[in-house]
Structure formats: C-alpha cells, structure tokens
Amino acid sequence: MTDRTALITGASRGLGAALAEQLARTHHIIAVGRTTGALEELDDRIQAKGGQATLAPMDITEAAAMQQLCRSIHDRWGSLDIWCHTAIHAAPLAPATHGAEKDLTRSLEINVTATARLISYVAPLLGTEGRAVFFADDRAGEKFFSAYGATKAAQIALAESWQAETMRTGPRIDIARPPAMPTATRARFFPGEDRGALTPCDTAAQTLLRTLSLSD
C-alpha cells in the first residue's frame, strides 16, 4: 500500500481517467468526477492492476463539497503529493455573436471560478513539496470557440500566476499541452474527425507523466 496520494479532478473519463490509471501504480488515487458509473469503472480498472482509489462523485462547482473533500484528504493522509486538474466544461461551438449566456455562465463556473477556488483549497495540502498539473488547450481567439477558448485561457492564466508565485517556494506548478486525443470533449468540437488518427488517452498520459518526471 502506497502512502503517496494523487488527486484527479475530472477523473471520470478521457485524459483524467488515463492519468488516474497510470498514477495508481505508485499513488493512492482520489478520483473526482460527476459520473458515478464512470468512476466505478475506473476503480475496477485500478483495482484489477493492484492499485487503490477513493471515489468522490462530486461537482467541482459546489464549494462546500470541495471543502469537505479537501478536509477529508487532510484528515486521512495529512497532505497531497499530486493534483492533476483535467475537469473542463466544453461549451457548444457558436459564433461570438450568438453564444448562449447559459453556456458562458457554466463555462465560467467550471473553468474559471471552480479552478480558482480549488487552487486555494488544494494549495495547503500540497505544501512546498507537492505538484499541481494543468492542461492547456490553445483555442483562445479561434472562430466559434469564444466561450470555451476564453474561459480555458483564463483557467491557464490562473495556473500561470500560481506558477510564478511559487517558483522559489513550491509547490511546483506544471502546465502541460497534451496532443489531440479521442475524448468526448473533442468529439463535440470535431464530430466528423478521424479518431483513429488521434493519440490514445493512455498513451498521452504515459508521455505526459514521463515528461513531467511523475512516472516511476
């Protein structure tokens, strides 16, 4: 049993699930996602490989739930070694002049406000030795990506500020740029794309963790 811990927000599927499976070889996984069934399937895969996970079927926009989660991590483990933040809201593509206000509001809640809140909650758990990883998607300014592009850019700006602020003191903040993967999010953006030409999520996760020196 490992005493190292990794929090994955957005662990239900896609890159988050792939990172959870890879990190479960060396860490106890705290998997956060809104889809209970997908988290349970992830847990089955992790257990089948000899790993362990704690499932947290939660919406990251619920402040009280995130506070309770972080308090529970502190009470059980005392600290956190890694946080990978893959949770994202992908608003439907639309011209900037016709985007639905509800889509922008939801994008802001998940991609920006919840991220800022989580940084403040998770930072004490990471201390000076932990690692946090964010995942950039450079869509800002592309046509039809106004809500997603703007809020994803804002999310990464938050991470970049935190990175600059902790450069000398820790924790270490990394901002990775994954390759195009056959995720549900990408399928909504590019429904006719040849998914066979994309990088599988597990391959991308392995490469990212190796590049970030997070794989043993």
Image (spheres, rainbow, N blue to C red):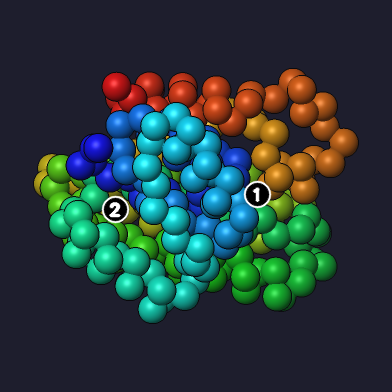
Badge 2 density bin: few <14, some 14–19, many ≥20, Cα 10 Å: many
Helix, strand or loop status at disc 2: helix
Image mark for residue 132 = none
Residue occupying image coordinates x 62% and y 70%: 106
Using the image, determine if residue 105 lies above or below residue 214: below
Q: Residue at x 75, y 62 (%)?
A: 96
Quadrant for the C terminus in the image = top left
Amino acid type, residue under disc 2 in the picture: Trp
Classify residue 130 as left or right of residue 106.
left
Q: In the picture provided, is 142 more to the left or to the right than 60?
A: right
Are circles 1 and 2 on residues that touch, CB within 8 Å? no
Whole-percent x, y for residue 102 in the image: 70, 75
Q: Residue furthest bottom?
A: 64
Q: x%, y% of residue 6? A: 33, 45
Residue at position x 60%, y 59% in the image: 35
Q: Nearer the viewer, residue 21 or 191?
A: 21
Type of amino acid at the residue the image marks with label 1: Gly
- Reading the image, the residue beneath label 2 is 162
Distance between mark 1 and mark 2 Cα atoms: 23 Å
Looking at the image, residue 206 sits to the left or right of residue 140; the answer is: left
Count how many numbered circles sit on residues in the image: 2
Q: Nearer the viewer, residue 68 or 93?
A: 68
Of residues 70 and 134, the one drawn nearer to the viewer in this rendering? 70
Q: Is residue 160 visible?
A: no
Residue occupied by mark 1: 141
Circle 1 packing at 10 Å, graded few (<14), some (14-19), many (20+), is few
Q: Quadrant of residue 89?
A: bottom right
Judged by depth in the image, the label closer to the viewer, 1 or 2, is 2
- Please tell me which residue is depicted at 49% across the width and 45% down the height of the picture: 43
